[in-house]
Amino acid sequence: MNLTEPYKTWLSQHIGTMIDPNLRYVLRVDVTTSQGKTTLDLGLDLTWFILIQIEDEDTKKLEIVLELLKVPQFVAQFKATLLIPETKRFF
Amino acid sequence: MLYNYYFLDGLKSYIDFTVLNSPIDFISQALFIRRSKQSDTPEIEDSRIKIVKIVLDSGFVLPSDYPTNSVGFAVRKVLLMESVADRFQVAKHMLDIGFQLFTNNPENNSELAVQLINNRTDATCLEIIKNNIAAFKEIRLSVAGSTNGSNLADYFYWVKEDMLAVNFIRETIGLDISP
């Protein structure tokens, strides 16, 4: 995909050079269930991974994500993440 | 994440709240999720209502399997946010899409009914009352001397001594003071 600057540089610095809408980024979180404490692996698409896990100002993160969401494949993956029961409760 | 108004506002056009809502009750979460150890401030109430408005304005449809009691408590919460000027409009919007005015908690219901009658000069509040007359007739409040609870007319007559409210209840709701 062709990203313009400054988004290209930001993504390269925070994510890497391989930007693929279909990639899933695993976020391991601690959860407490009736059986006790355990961990849960959340499979996030790049947009949610940026919003939740990358450290930067909210304005910058949202700006990058909205730029990515101009690409239909990213929109599809963003929406797919929202449909995962284990994942959406963390939103 | 989505209770961060900034993110929610930016991403709202990509989110189907009707899907997001099941099994998570997004509007109730927005209204009730604890924001601090203290009671809600007007600022917190404002941020809660802004999130609810985004969801309502998105064309949100109440799922048929939505827990019945939750829909009542959500509306009640909005209506009791006295610092929110347009709370009646927001509540009316919620009621229009299937939320319910009252819950299965009689005490909560009577408190809310009295609040609404006290705010009947607001046109939207009045509309809410008129749309729920049957439910208002069922409200029972404990008044000293009554065994089975009193109706709203009795309450405003004997407890509040508010004849304007009694007249309103008589003419609009169709309830009169018990003989």
Image: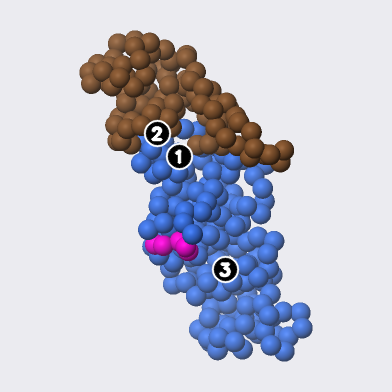
User: In front of the other: label 3 or label 1?
Assistant: 1
Give the Cα distance between marks 2 and 3. Answer: 34 Å
In this view of the protein, which residue sits in the foreground, B108 or A11?
A11
Q: Chain of mark 2?
A: B
**Contact, mark 2 vs mark 1 (Cβ under 8 Å):** yes
Q: Residue at x 67, y 48 (%)?
A: B67
Q: Chain of mark 1?
A: B
Give the Cα distance between marks 3 and 1. Answer: 29 Å
The N terminus of chain B lies in quadrant: top left
In this view of the protein, which residue sits in the foreground, B123 or A53?
A53
Q: Which chain is brown?
A: A
Q: Residue at x 43, y 58 (%)?
A: B45
Give the Cα distance between marks 2 and 1. Answer: 9 Å
Q: Which residue is mark 1?
A: B2
Instruction: Give residue B65's quadrant in the image.
Output: top right
How far across and how far down the image is residue B86, in percent?
40, 59
Are tags 3 and 1 found on a single chain?
Answer: yes
User: In front of the other: label 2 or label 3?
Assistant: 2
Range shown magenta:
B38-42
